[in-house]
Image (cartoon, grey):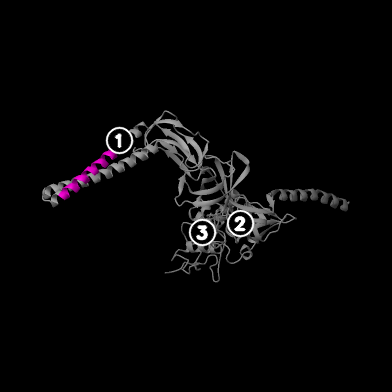
Protein backbone atom coordinates (compact mmCIF):
# COMPACT_ATOMS: atom_id res chain seq x y z
CA UNK A 1 0.00 0.00 0.00
CA UNK A 2 2.86 2.35 0.81
CA UNK A 3 4.52 1.63 -2.55
CA UNK A 4 1.27 2.39 -4.34
CA UNK A 5 0.98 5.74 -2.56
CA UNK A 6 4.53 6.65 -3.48
CA UNK A 7 3.89 5.75 -7.09
CA UNK A 8 0.71 7.82 -7.17
CA UNK A 9 2.51 10.74 -5.53
CA UNK A 10 5.34 10.62 -8.11
CA UNK A 11 2.81 10.39 -10.90
CA UNK A 12 1.11 13.54 -9.61
CA UNK A 13 4.35 15.48 -9.10
CA UNK A 14 5.82 14.64 -12.56
CA UNK A 15 3.21 16.61 -14.61
CA UNK A 16 3.69 19.57 -12.30
CA UNK A 17 7.44 19.52 -12.87
CA UNK A 18 6.97 19.17 -16.62
CA UNK A 19 4.53 22.09 -16.63
CA UNK A 20 7.00 24.24 -14.70
CA UNK A 21 9.80 23.31 -17.09
CA UNK A 22 7.67 24.14 -20.11
CA UNK A 23 6.63 27.45 -18.53
CA UNK A 24 10.24 28.41 -17.93
CA UNK A 25 11.13 27.47 -21.49
CA UNK A 26 8.27 29.58 -22.80
CA UNK A 27 9.54 32.58 -20.80
CA UNK A 28 12.86 32.53 -22.67
CA UNK A 29 12.85 35.21 -25.37
CA UNK A 30 12.78 33.99 -28.93
CA UNK A 31 15.96 35.12 -30.63
CA UNK A 32 15.85 35.98 -34.34
CA UNK A 33 18.89 34.71 -36.13
CA UNK A 34 20.55 34.64 -39.53
CA UNK A 35 23.22 32.42 -41.06
CA UNK A 36 26.74 33.56 -41.78
CA UNK A 37 27.11 33.38 -45.56
CA UNK A 38 29.84 33.42 -48.17
CA UNK A 39 29.39 35.91 -50.98
CA UNK A 40 30.59 39.01 -52.75
CA UNK A 41 30.47 42.44 -51.16
CA UNK A 42 30.39 45.45 -53.46
CA UNK A 43 30.45 48.96 -52.03
CA UNK A 44 28.69 51.49 -54.24
CA UNK A 45 27.95 55.19 -53.92
CA UNK A 46 24.52 55.70 -55.43
CA UNK A 47 23.13 58.94 -56.83
CA UNK A 48 20.73 60.23 -59.46
CA UNK A 49 21.27 62.82 -62.15
CA UNK A 50 20.54 63.73 -65.73
CA UNK A 51 22.33 63.02 -68.99
CA UNK A 52 23.70 66.06 -70.79
CA UNK A 53 26.13 66.70 -73.65
CA UNK A 54 29.67 67.71 -72.81
CA UNK A 55 29.77 70.40 -75.51
CA UNK A 56 26.63 72.43 -76.13
CA UNK A 57 26.53 75.55 -78.33
CA UNK A 58 23.85 78.22 -78.84
CA UNK A 59 23.81 79.38 -82.46
CA UNK A 60 23.12 83.12 -82.87
CA UNK A 61 23.41 85.61 -85.70
CA UNK A 62 25.69 88.62 -85.79
CA UNK A 63 23.30 90.26 -88.26
CA UNK A 64 19.77 91.49 -87.64
CA UNK A 65 16.90 90.97 -90.00
CA UNK A 66 14.31 88.54 -91.25
CA UNK A 67 15.11 84.84 -91.59
CA UNK A 68 14.66 83.93 -95.23
CA UNK A 69 15.34 80.22 -94.98
CA UNK A 70 16.26 77.49 -92.51
CA UNK A 71 18.18 74.51 -93.87
CA UNK A 72 18.16 72.19 -90.83
CA UNK A 73 15.64 70.81 -88.37
CA UNK A 74 15.80 69.28 -84.87
CA UNK A 75 17.70 65.98 -84.91
CA UNK A 76 19.76 66.73 -88.03
CA UNK A 77 23.45 65.98 -87.78
CA UNK A 78 25.71 68.58 -89.38
CA UNK A 79 29.40 69.00 -90.06
CA UNK A 80 31.52 72.09 -89.31
CA UNK A 81 30.71 74.92 -91.77
CA UNK A 82 27.40 73.43 -92.90
CA UNK A 83 24.77 76.00 -93.98
CA UNK A 84 22.12 76.45 -91.30
CA UNK A 85 20.14 79.57 -92.24
CA UNK A 86 20.16 82.77 -94.30
CA UNK A 87 18.98 86.23 -93.25
CA UNK A 88 17.57 89.00 -95.42
CA UNK A 89 20.74 90.73 -96.66
CA UNK A 90 19.21 93.97 -97.98
CA UNK A 91 20.17 96.24 -95.10
CA UNK A 92 23.61 94.71 -94.84
CA UNK A 93 24.14 94.91 -98.60
CA UNK A 94 23.18 98.59 -98.61
CA UNK A 95 25.74 99.28 -95.93
CA UNK A 96 28.34 97.34 -97.87
CA UNK A 97 27.72 99.24 -101.08
CA UNK A 98 27.90 102.56 -99.24
CA UNK A 99 31.18 101.56 -97.62
CA UNK A 100 32.52 100.53 -101.02
CA UNK A 101 31.62 103.95 -102.48
CA UNK A 102 33.22 105.76 -99.54
CA UNK A 103 36.39 103.75 -100.12
CA UNK A 104 36.53 104.83 -103.77
CA UNK A 105 36.08 108.49 -102.73
CA UNK A 106 38.83 108.18 -100.14
CA UNK A 107 41.23 106.71 -102.69
CA UNK A 108 40.51 109.51 -105.18
CA UNK A 109 40.90 112.19 -102.51
CA UNK A 110 44.24 110.72 -101.48
CA UNK A 111 45.50 110.81 -105.08
CA UNK A 112 44.51 114.47 -105.45
CA UNK A 113 46.04 115.43 -102.11
CA UNK A 114 49.25 113.65 -103.00
CA UNK A 115 49.47 115.46 -106.35
CA UNK A 116 48.82 118.83 -104.71
CA UNK A 117 51.42 118.21 -102.03
CA UNK A 118 54.03 117.19 -104.62
CA UNK A 119 53.33 120.31 -106.72
CA UNK A 120 53.56 122.49 -103.63
CA UNK A 121 57.00 121.11 -102.84
CA UNK A 122 58.19 122.04 -106.35
CA UNK A 123 56.69 125.54 -106.09
CA UNK A 124 58.26 126.23 -102.70
CA UNK A 125 61.64 125.40 -104.16
CA UNK A 126 61.08 128.06 -106.87
CA UNK A 127 59.84 130.56 -104.24
CA UNK A 128 56.43 130.73 -105.95
CA UNK A 129 54.34 129.89 -102.83
CA UNK A 130 54.86 130.54 -99.20
CA UNK A 131 55.75 128.07 -96.51
CA UNK A 132 52.27 128.36 -95.02
CA UNK A 133 50.67 127.16 -98.26
CA UNK A 134 53.02 124.16 -98.34
CA UNK A 135 52.01 123.23 -94.82
CA UNK A 136 48.34 123.42 -95.77
CA UNK A 137 48.88 121.00 -98.66
CA UNK A 138 50.78 118.65 -96.36
CA UNK A 139 47.91 118.66 -93.82
CA UNK A 140 45.37 117.92 -96.54
CA UNK A 141 47.46 114.97 -97.67
CA UNK A 142 47.63 113.56 -94.10
CA UNK A 143 43.84 113.92 -93.71
CA UNK A 144 43.30 112.11 -97.01
CA UNK A 145 45.46 109.22 -95.86
CA UNK A 146 43.53 108.96 -92.59
CA UNK A 147 40.22 109.06 -94.45
CA UNK A 148 41.40 106.20 -96.65
CA UNK A 149 42.30 104.10 -93.60
CA UNK A 150 38.84 104.71 -92.11
CA UNK A 151 37.15 103.89 -95.39
CA UNK A 152 39.09 100.64 -95.75
CA UNK A 153 38.23 99.59 -92.17
CA UNK A 154 34.54 100.40 -92.73
CA UNK A 155 34.58 98.47 -95.98
CA UNK A 156 36.06 95.38 -94.34
CA UNK A 157 33.52 95.60 -91.50
CA UNK A 158 30.58 95.77 -93.89
CA UNK A 159 32.10 92.95 -95.91
CA UNK A 160 32.09 90.78 -92.76
CA UNK A 161 28.52 91.82 -92.00
CA UNK A 162 27.53 90.75 -95.46
CA UNK A 163 28.94 87.29 -94.77
CA UNK A 164 27.17 87.21 -91.39
CA UNK A 165 23.76 86.92 -93.02
CA UNK A 166 24.74 83.33 -93.87
CA UNK A 167 24.67 81.19 -90.68
CA UNK A 168 26.99 78.16 -90.65
CA UNK A 169 27.62 75.39 -88.11
CA UNK A 170 30.47 76.21 -85.69
CA UNK A 171 31.21 72.53 -85.04
CA UNK A 172 30.13 69.00 -85.81
CA UNK A 173 27.05 67.95 -83.88
CA UNK A 174 23.30 67.44 -83.78
CA UNK A 175 20.58 70.07 -83.71
CA UNK A 176 18.79 69.48 -80.38
CA UNK A 177 16.60 72.60 -80.37
CA UNK A 178 15.34 75.15 -82.91
CA UNK A 179 13.90 78.37 -81.53
CA UNK A 180 12.83 80.29 -84.67
CA UNK A 181 10.99 79.78 -87.93
CA UNK A 182 11.29 81.30 -91.39
CA UNK A 183 9.99 84.86 -91.54
CA UNK A 184 10.93 85.74 -87.95
CA UNK A 185 12.89 88.98 -87.47
CA UNK A 186 15.86 88.37 -85.18
CA UNK A 187 18.19 90.63 -83.25
CA UNK A 188 21.94 90.74 -83.66
CA UNK A 189 23.98 89.04 -80.95
CA UNK A 190 26.80 91.57 -81.21
CA UNK A 191 24.72 94.75 -81.39
CA UNK A 192 22.01 93.93 -78.82
CA UNK A 193 22.52 94.29 -75.08
CA UNK A 194 20.27 91.29 -74.39
CA UNK A 195 22.57 88.97 -76.32
CA UNK A 196 20.49 88.66 -79.45
CA UNK A 197 18.13 85.93 -80.60
CA UNK A 198 19.06 82.26 -80.23
CA UNK A 199 18.36 80.51 -83.53
CA UNK A 200 19.09 76.93 -82.46
CA UNK A 201 21.09 74.81 -80.03
CA UNK A 202 23.44 72.09 -81.20
CA UNK A 203 25.56 69.62 -79.29
CA UNK A 204 28.01 66.79 -79.82
CA UNK A 205 26.11 63.68 -78.72
CA UNK A 206 28.98 61.26 -79.23
CA UNK A 207 30.38 62.08 -75.79
CA UNK A 208 27.88 62.54 -72.97
CA UNK A 209 28.11 63.11 -69.26
CA UNK A 210 25.91 62.69 -66.21
CA UNK A 211 25.77 65.51 -63.70
CA UNK A 212 24.78 63.97 -60.39
CA UNK A 213 24.70 65.02 -56.75
CA UNK A 214 26.49 62.71 -54.30
CA UNK A 215 25.91 62.81 -50.55
CA UNK A 216 28.77 64.33 -48.60
CA UNK A 217 29.18 61.11 -46.57
CA UNK A 218 30.49 59.39 -49.72
CA UNK A 219 32.71 62.21 -50.95
CA UNK A 220 35.75 61.12 -48.95
CA UNK A 221 35.89 57.85 -50.90
CA UNK A 222 35.24 59.09 -54.44
CA UNK A 223 38.21 59.89 -56.66
CA UNK A 224 38.64 61.00 -60.24
CA UNK A 225 38.99 58.03 -62.57
CA UNK A 226 36.74 55.65 -60.59
CA UNK A 227 34.47 53.38 -62.59
CA UNK A 228 30.76 54.10 -62.60
CA UNK A 229 27.69 52.25 -63.84
CA UNK A 230 24.83 54.29 -65.31
CA UNK A 231 21.27 53.13 -65.93
CA UNK A 232 18.50 55.07 -67.66
CA UNK A 233 14.77 54.40 -67.68
CA UNK A 234 14.69 54.16 -71.47
CA UNK A 235 16.91 51.05 -71.35
CA UNK A 236 16.17 49.33 -68.01
CA UNK A 237 17.93 46.10 -68.97
CA UNK A 238 21.13 47.77 -70.10
CA UNK A 239 23.99 49.43 -68.26
CA UNK A 240 26.37 52.10 -69.55
CA UNK A 241 29.91 52.27 -68.29
CA UNK A 242 31.38 55.60 -67.28
CA UNK A 243 34.23 57.14 -65.36
CA UNK A 244 34.32 59.92 -62.78
CA UNK A 245 35.76 62.98 -64.52
CA UNK A 246 35.29 65.82 -62.05
CA UNK A 247 34.24 66.50 -58.47
CA UNK A 248 33.13 70.11 -58.16
CA UNK A 249 34.31 71.88 -54.99
CA UNK A 250 31.15 73.83 -54.18
CA UNK A 251 28.51 71.96 -52.20
CA UNK A 252 24.81 72.09 -53.01
CA UNK A 253 22.28 72.01 -50.18
CA UNK A 254 18.86 70.55 -51.02
CA UNK A 255 16.27 70.00 -48.28
CA UNK A 256 18.94 70.39 -45.59
CA UNK A 257 21.09 67.68 -47.23
CA UNK A 258 24.60 68.64 -48.32
CA UNK A 259 25.71 67.14 -51.63
CA UNK A 260 28.48 67.69 -54.14
CA UNK A 261 28.16 67.69 -57.96
CA UNK A 262 30.05 64.82 -59.57
CA UNK A 263 30.53 64.58 -63.35
CA UNK A 264 30.61 61.10 -64.90
CA UNK A 265 31.75 60.77 -68.53
CA UNK A 266 29.96 58.33 -70.86
CA UNK A 267 30.71 56.95 -74.31
CA UNK A 268 27.65 57.42 -76.52
CA UNK A 269 29.04 56.08 -79.76
CA UNK A 270 25.83 54.10 -80.34
CA UNK A 271 23.72 57.22 -79.92
CA UNK A 272 21.31 55.65 -77.42
CA UNK A 273 21.65 58.30 -74.72
CA UNK A 274 19.75 61.56 -75.18
CA UNK A 275 20.10 64.86 -73.33
CA UNK A 276 17.78 65.17 -70.36
CA UNK A 277 17.42 61.46 -69.61
CA UNK A 278 17.16 60.60 -65.92
CA UNK A 279 20.09 58.46 -64.86
CA UNK A 280 20.91 56.33 -61.83
CA UNK A 281 24.62 56.30 -61.13
CA UNK A 282 26.54 53.76 -59.06
CA UNK A 283 30.19 54.53 -58.40
CA UNK A 284 32.30 51.54 -57.43
CA UNK A 285 34.08 52.30 -54.15
CA UNK A 286 35.42 48.86 -53.19
CA UNK A 287 34.65 45.18 -53.64
CA UNK A 288 35.49 41.98 -51.78
CA UNK A 289 34.73 38.73 -53.66
CA UNK A 290 34.01 35.42 -51.93
CA UNK A 291 34.18 36.63 -48.33
CA UNK A 292 32.37 35.82 -45.08
CA UNK A 293 29.33 38.08 -44.68
CA UNK A 294 27.21 38.80 -41.61
CA UNK A 295 24.14 41.07 -41.26
CA UNK A 296 24.89 44.47 -39.77
CA UNK A 297 22.18 44.14 -37.14
CA UNK A 298 24.05 41.14 -35.72
CA UNK A 299 27.14 43.26 -35.01
CA UNK A 300 27.51 45.25 -31.81
CA UNK A 301 30.35 47.43 -30.65
CA UNK A 302 32.23 46.36 -27.50
CA UNK A 303 30.73 49.30 -25.60
CA UNK A 304 27.25 47.87 -26.14
CA UNK A 305 28.10 44.23 -25.46
CA UNK A 306 26.38 44.22 -22.05
CA UNK A 307 23.09 45.81 -23.25
CA UNK A 308 23.07 43.47 -26.25
CA UNK A 309 23.48 40.47 -23.95
CA UNK A 310 20.52 41.68 -21.93
CA UNK A 311 18.42 41.86 -25.11
CA UNK A 312 19.16 38.18 -25.74
CA UNK A 313 18.19 37.20 -22.19
CA UNK A 314 21.78 36.67 -21.04
CA UNK A 315 23.41 37.90 -17.87
CA UNK A 316 26.24 40.30 -18.79
CA UNK A 317 28.08 39.41 -15.60
CA UNK A 318 28.57 35.85 -16.87
CA UNK A 319 30.93 37.06 -19.62
CA UNK A 320 34.25 38.89 -19.61
CA UNK A 321 33.77 40.96 -22.76
CA UNK A 322 36.99 42.91 -22.30
CA UNK A 323 39.16 39.80 -22.42
CA UNK A 324 37.69 38.83 -25.80
CA UNK A 325 39.06 41.93 -27.55
CA UNK A 326 42.51 43.44 -28.10
CA UNK A 327 43.52 46.31 -25.87
CA UNK A 328 42.86 48.79 -28.68
CA UNK A 329 39.18 47.84 -28.83
CA UNK A 330 36.92 50.84 -28.63
CA UNK A 331 39.53 53.44 -29.50
CA UNK A 332 39.04 55.92 -32.22
CA UNK A 333 39.22 54.38 -35.66
CA UNK A 334 38.41 50.82 -34.50
CA UNK A 335 34.65 51.25 -34.17
CA UNK A 336 33.99 54.52 -35.92
CA UNK A 337 31.28 54.19 -38.51
CA UNK A 338 28.16 55.79 -39.85
CA UNK A 339 26.08 54.25 -37.15
CA UNK A 340 28.18 55.88 -34.40
CA UNK A 341 31.28 54.92 -32.48
CA UNK A 342 33.32 55.65 -29.44
CA UNK A 343 35.53 58.63 -29.08
CA UNK A 344 39.13 58.63 -27.95
CA UNK A 345 39.64 56.11 -25.21
CA UNK A 346 36.08 54.75 -25.16
CA UNK A 347 35.90 51.13 -24.11
CA UNK A 348 39.64 50.64 -23.57
CA UNK A 349 41.85 50.65 -20.50
CA UNK A 350 45.62 50.67 -20.81
CA UNK A 351 48.24 49.73 -18.24
CA UNK A 352 47.53 51.45 -14.99
CA UNK A 353 44.08 52.54 -16.14
CA UNK A 354 41.34 53.40 -13.71
CA UNK A 355 38.97 50.77 -12.37
CA UNK A 356 35.37 51.43 -11.56
CA UNK A 357 34.98 54.03 -8.84
CA UNK A 358 38.57 55.25 -9.17
CA UNK A 359 38.98 58.93 -9.95
CA UNK A 360 42.40 58.48 -11.51
CA UNK A 361 43.28 57.32 -15.01
CA UNK A 362 45.09 58.82 -17.98
CA UNK A 363 43.79 60.03 -21.31
CA UNK A 364 45.38 59.05 -24.60
CA UNK A 365 47.10 62.42 -24.82
CA UNK A 366 48.52 61.98 -21.32
CA UNK A 367 46.44 64.68 -19.61
CA UNK A 368 44.78 64.11 -16.29
CA UNK A 369 41.40 62.47 -16.79
CA UNK A 370 39.41 63.68 -13.76
CA UNK A 371 37.96 67.04 -12.92
CA UNK A 372 39.26 68.34 -9.57
CA UNK A 373 36.84 67.58 -6.77
CA UNK A 374 34.12 66.09 -9.01
CA UNK A 375 33.76 62.50 -7.83
CA UNK A 376 30.61 61.88 -9.90
CA UNK A 377 32.37 62.77 -13.15
CA UNK A 378 35.46 60.74 -12.22
CA UNK A 379 33.36 57.67 -11.42
CA UNK A 380 31.39 57.83 -14.65
CA UNK A 381 34.54 58.40 -16.68
CA UNK A 382 36.09 55.32 -15.07
CA UNK A 383 33.07 53.28 -16.16
CA UNK A 384 33.61 54.46 -19.74
CA UNK A 385 37.28 53.57 -19.67
CA UNK A 386 36.53 50.14 -18.26
CA UNK A 387 34.20 49.46 -21.18
CA UNK A 388 31.04 49.06 -19.12
CA UNK A 389 29.30 51.97 -20.87
CA UNK A 390 30.00 53.71 -24.17
CA UNK A 391 30.69 57.38 -24.70
CA UNK A 392 27.30 57.81 -26.36
CA UNK A 393 25.63 56.09 -23.40
CA UNK A 394 27.53 58.41 -21.05
CA UNK A 395 26.18 61.39 -22.99
CA UNK A 396 22.66 60.00 -22.65
CA UNK A 397 23.19 59.51 -18.94
CA UNK A 398 24.48 63.04 -18.43
CA UNK A 399 21.51 64.42 -20.43
CA UNK A 400 19.08 62.54 -18.25
CA UNK A 401 18.37 59.69 -20.66
CA UNK A 402 17.49 61.81 -23.72
CA UNK A 403 18.77 61.07 -27.20
CA UNK A 404 21.45 58.70 -28.31
CA UNK A 405 20.90 55.75 -30.58
CA UNK A 406 22.44 52.31 -30.66
CA UNK A 407 26.14 52.20 -31.28
CA UNK A 408 26.42 49.83 -34.22
CA UNK A 409 28.87 49.30 -37.01
CA UNK A 410 26.23 49.37 -39.76
CA UNK A 411 27.30 51.15 -42.88
CA UNK A 412 30.91 51.57 -41.86
CA UNK A 413 33.56 51.05 -44.50
CA UNK A 414 36.61 51.22 -42.24
CA UNK A 415 38.69 48.03 -42.41
CA UNK A 416 39.98 46.15 -39.40
CA UNK A 417 37.35 47.16 -36.83
CA UNK A 418 36.92 45.03 -33.73
CA UNK A 419 33.32 44.08 -32.86
CA UNK A 420 31.21 41.39 -31.23
CA UNK A 421 28.53 38.97 -32.39
CA UNK A 422 26.45 36.47 -30.46
CA UNK A 423 26.76 33.00 -31.99
CA UNK A 424 23.92 30.51 -31.56
CA UNK A 425 25.19 26.94 -31.15
CA UNK A 426 23.34 23.84 -32.35
CA UNK A 427 22.03 23.18 -28.83
CA UNK A 428 20.55 26.69 -28.68
CA UNK A 429 23.13 28.23 -26.35
CA UNK A 430 24.30 31.75 -27.15
CA UNK A 431 27.91 32.81 -26.73
CA UNK A 432 29.55 36.18 -27.55
CA UNK A 433 32.46 36.11 -29.93
CA UNK A 434 34.94 38.75 -31.02
CA UNK A 435 35.28 39.34 -34.75
CA UNK A 436 37.21 41.64 -37.05
CA UNK A 437 35.00 43.54 -39.50
CA UNK A 438 36.23 44.76 -42.87
CA UNK A 439 34.17 46.42 -45.57
CA UNK A 440 30.53 47.17 -44.85
CA UNK A 441 27.51 48.41 -46.71
CA UNK A 442 24.10 49.29 -45.33
CA UNK A 443 23.05 45.63 -45.00
CA UNK A 444 26.05 43.34 -44.53
CA UNK A 445 29.64 43.44 -43.36
CA UNK A 446 32.74 41.49 -44.30
CA UNK A 447 34.18 39.36 -41.49
CA UNK A 448 37.95 39.15 -41.65
CA UNK A 449 38.27 36.77 -38.72
CA UNK A 450 36.16 35.17 -36.00
CA UNK A 451 33.34 33.54 -37.99
CA UNK A 452 32.89 30.86 -40.61
CA UNK A 453 30.20 30.31 -43.17
CA UNK A 454 27.16 28.38 -41.95
CA UNK A 455 27.21 29.55 -38.34
CA UNK A 456 24.12 31.18 -36.88
CA UNK A 457 24.28 34.64 -35.31
CA UNK A 458 21.64 36.43 -33.26
CA UNK A 459 20.01 39.54 -34.68
CA UNK A 460 19.55 42.50 -32.37
CA UNK A 461 17.06 45.20 -33.26
CA UNK A 462 18.00 48.84 -32.83
CA UNK A 463 14.92 49.60 -30.74
CA UNK A 464 15.59 46.62 -28.46
CA UNK A 465 19.20 47.61 -28.03
CA UNK A 466 18.28 51.20 -27.21
CA UNK A 467 15.76 50.04 -24.62
CA UNK A 468 18.36 47.73 -23.14
CA UNK A 469 20.85 50.59 -23.04
CA UNK A 470 18.39 52.63 -21.01
CA UNK A 471 17.89 49.73 -18.59
CA UNK A 472 21.65 49.31 -18.33
CA UNK A 473 22.06 53.01 -17.66
CA UNK A 474 19.52 52.76 -14.85
CA UNK A 475 21.73 50.13 -13.28
CA UNK A 476 24.72 52.44 -13.66
CA UNK A 477 22.76 55.26 -12.04
CA UNK A 478 21.87 53.06 -9.11
CA UNK A 479 25.48 51.96 -8.79
CA UNK A 480 27.12 55.38 -9.37
CA UNK A 481 24.59 57.66 -7.70
CA UNK A 482 22.61 60.53 -9.19
CA UNK A 483 24.10 61.85 -12.44
CA UNK A 484 23.27 65.40 -11.35
CA UNK A 485 25.33 65.57 -8.19
CA UNK A 486 26.19 63.84 -4.93
CA UNK A 487 28.99 61.54 -3.92
CA UNK A 488 29.09 58.32 -5.92
CA UNK A 489 31.62 56.63 -3.76
CA UNK A 490 34.47 57.54 -6.10
CA UNK A 491 37.63 59.21 -4.91
CA UNK A 492 37.89 62.77 -6.27
CA UNK A 493 41.17 64.19 -7.42
CA UNK A 494 42.31 67.24 -5.47
CA UNK A 495 43.82 70.29 -6.90
Residues drawn in magenta = 101-122
Q: Position of residue 224 (x, y in %)?
A: 52, 54
Q: CA distance from mark 1 to mark 3?
A: 102 Å
- Name the residue beneath numbered marker 3: 481
Circles 1 and 2: CB distance less than 8 Å? no
Sequence order check: which comes first, mark 1 or mark 3? 1
Image: 249 above or below 188: below
Q: Position of residue 322 (x, y in %)?
A: 61, 64
What residue appears at the point 52 percent right and 67 percent down from the top-left corner?
Answer: 358
Q: Nearer the viewer, residue 238 or 58?
A: 58
Image: 165 above or below 410: above
Q: Between tags 1 and 2, which lies in front?
A: 1
**Residue 111 on the magenta segment:** yes
Determine the image quadrant of residue 91. top left
Q: How many marks?
A: 3
- Name the residue beneath numbered marker 1: 98
- Residue 231 in sight from this viewpoint: yes
Q: Secondary structure at mark 1?
A: helix
The label shown at residue 439 is 2
Q: Position of residue 24 (x, y in %)?
A: 71, 50
Amino acid sequence: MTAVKRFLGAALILPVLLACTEGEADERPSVPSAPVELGNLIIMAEATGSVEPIKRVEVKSKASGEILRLYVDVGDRVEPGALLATIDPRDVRNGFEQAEADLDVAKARLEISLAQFTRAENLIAADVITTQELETRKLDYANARAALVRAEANFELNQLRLSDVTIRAPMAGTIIQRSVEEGVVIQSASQNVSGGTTLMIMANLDDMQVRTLVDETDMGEIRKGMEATVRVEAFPDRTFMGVVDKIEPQAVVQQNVTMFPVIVLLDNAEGLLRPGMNAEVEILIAEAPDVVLVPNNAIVSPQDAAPAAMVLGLNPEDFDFRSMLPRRAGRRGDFAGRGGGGRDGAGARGEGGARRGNAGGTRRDGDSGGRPGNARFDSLRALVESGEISRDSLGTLMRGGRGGGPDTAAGSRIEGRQALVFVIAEDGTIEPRAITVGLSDWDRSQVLSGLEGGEQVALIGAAQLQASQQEFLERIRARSGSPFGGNTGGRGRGR
